[in-house]
Image (cartoon, rainbow, N blue to C red):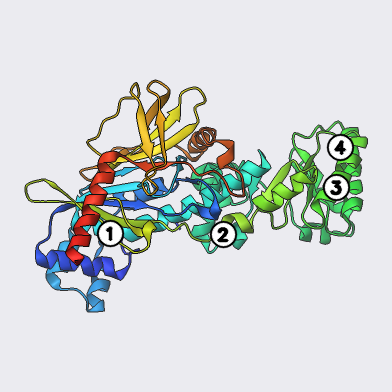
Amino acid sequence: MNYDNLTLLTDLYELTMMQGYFKSGATERVVFDAFYRKNPCNGAYAIACGLEQVIDYIKNLHFEEKDIDYLRSTGFFTEDFLEYLSNFRFTGDIYAIPEGTIVFPREPLVKVIAPIMEAQLVETALLNIINHQSLIATKTARVVHEAGPGVMEFGLRRAQGPDAGIYGARAAMIAGCIGTSNVLAGQMFDVPVKGTHAHSWIMSFKTELEAFRTYAELFPDNCILLVDTYDVLEGVKHAITIFDEMKAKGIKSRFFGIRIDSGDLAYLSKKARIMLDEAGYPDAVISASSDLDEYLINSLKNQGAKITSWGVGTNLITSKDWPSFGGVYKLAAIYGEDGQEIPKIKVSENLEKVTNPGNKKILRLYDKKTGKIRGDLIALIAEEYDPEKDLTLFDPVATWKRTTLAGGSYEIRELLVPVFINGKCVYESPTVMEIRDICAKEKETLWEESQRLVNPQEVFVDLSQDLWDLKNKLLDKVHNYRD
């Protein structure tokens, strides 16, 4: 829900580590990166989402008296540390990729530069917020790509709790839905709310025709009639009767049609389209629901389904086939007493878990002619690049795989933007509908080959030569240490 203070929304070990830093006198500034390792749903991209809630969390980050009392009751913490917490405020810097932006694995979505205790505390909540909303936004983008315009988010009743329903709806709107059934989300984020009626409405009347007629009288400008309570094609006939009655009364509905929630959606929508067209209603909407996802929508469209509006619920709001985004938060650098950066690296036998060290930036490279993404370059913060000069990119693992972008053929955009500087917020979040427009433009920068459902073409995410050299130097150092 819309809590004012999420400070205790953290794992216990964040606080026990903080106490350890406090007791040892550790006050150095550090760099942490929040990133993910694998695209959801075996896709080729993700969508960054949740930054506005991260901002709210950081702004309200403080320990209230009741929080201190609770922590004291656990027996884990000393009085001098609790005293420190009672005066705690975030004083560091945060950089982030704006919401709605297309993102790829291994590049920091959020970068925190702060005293080590502050940077440690924010890990859990930051990941909780970014992981969930980025997951639902990515899933929605896949659904919208297959369905086209006209996807409605209908998942509240199947979401894993109120928060998931509210902020999942927000993410879905950002990624391209035209509306949500979630009224509270509509109020909180000023987004369109959509919906019609349930089967129980039909069943509460003596006849389906009477139920339709009453509904049309109540909502003539939003008259979508659910036709599958008893028999779909008979329901379509009854809907046509209602549309004829409205026409005879001179009522011109702004938005009218039918919804099918069960059965063979391809066959039934094609039959319904014929019936509606023959009755003189080619503009009537055919809306469908019933456990839809991007794969089923793709199949229905390949079968020639005549569906113009899609209500997608369970599989979208839960990202049913890929329930976790997998974002992580890793230490990348420490600043010594002299202010010099000491890069840090996590080593693992699992190649994808080896981190990229140092204070970094992300440069997105666009093809000048098409506006499409050619690749992303993760570079050290001090590096500078001239788009008028040739730029050679190489795969950081299979280094023999190289490509050269000719000078003047590409444009550069730095993705990370300042959000907090010295604890003060310097970023103003756009509205959800504004972010939705940003996201729509972002999706246009993806090549079609990277948006297909099966074996999509991955976008290059490469390391600069300087970063690659630094990473391998640290790996060699670890190897020599082990020897």
Residue receiving disc 3: 213
Number of the label disc, if any, that sits on residue 246 = 4
Residue receiving disc 2: 318
User: Would you identify the image quadrant in which residue 252 lies?
Assistant: top right
Residue 391 horizontal/vertical position (percent): 35, 30
* Along the line of sight, the residue nearer the viewer: 293 or 23: 293
Q: Secondary structure at mark 1?
A: loop
Residue at 57% across, 57% down: 319
| Nearest-to-viewer mark from 4 and 2 | 2
Q: Is residue 328 above or below residue 376?
A: below
Residue 427 shown left or right of residue 272 in the figure: left
Q: Amino acid at mark 3?
A: Arg
Q: Residues within 10 Å of mark 3 (few under 14, many from 20)?
A: many
Q: CA distance from mark 1 to mark 3?
A: 66 Å
Number of the label disc, if any, that sits on residue 346 = 1
Q: Residues within 10 Å of mark 4 (few under 14, many from 20)?
A: some
Residue 273 shown left or right of residue 393 in the figure: right
